[in-house]
Amino acid sequence: PGDKVATRSASPRALPPERLASMAGEVFGPDRVSVAESLPEAVERAVELADAGGEPGGAGVLVAGSVTLAGDARALLRRAGGADSGDA
């Protein structure tokens, strides 16, 4: 799979991940984009891809999209990290 992961937010207006991946594939190349049906799956896959990159000092994951997706990702990562403050 590619180094970009397309998924959907919880918004009823969100594009299907397959359509978003197709659009991203036109920009980055179809071999660089994969589809995840849920945000947790997308984040997990992105972390695996970042870890597999072997970059000195590590690599990161960037969640980009709508405000809804950013909020969903923030909530997901706070739950996963056990964060109980507003720092996450």
Image (cartoon, rainbow, N blue to C red):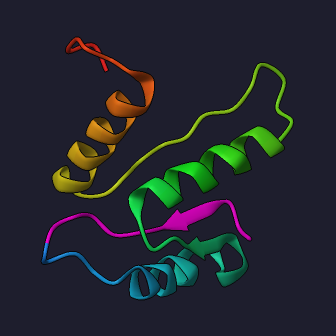
Answer left or right for 59 relative to 27: right
Answer left or right for 34 relative to 70: right
- Quadrant for the N terminus in the image: bottom right
Residue 35 x %, y %: 54, 75
**Residue found 33% across the figure and 28% down from its top:** 78
- Image quarter of residue 39: bottom left
Q: Is residue 77 magenta?
A: no
Q: Is 44 rendered above or below residue 78?
A: below
Q: Is 18 rendered above or below residue 67?
A: below
Q: Residue lying furthest left in this view?
A: 12
**Residue found 51% across the figure and 70% down from its top:** 36
Q: Nearer the viewer, residue 26 or 64?
A: 64
**Residue found 31% across the figure and 57% down from its top:** 65
**Residue found 69% across the figure and 32% down from its top:** 59
- Image quarter of residue 71: top left
In this rendering, the count of numbered labels is 0
- Bounds of the magenta span? 1-11
Magenta span dominant secondary structure: loop
Q: Is 50 rendered above or below residue 84?
A: below
Residue 44 x %, y %: 58, 50
Residue 80 x %, y %: 43, 32
Answer left or right for 79 relative to 12: right
- Quadrant for the C terminus in the image: top left
Residue 3 x %, y %: 68, 60
- Image quarter of residue 26: bottom right
Q: Is 7 rendered above or below residue 44?
A: below
Answer left or right for 9 relative to 49: left
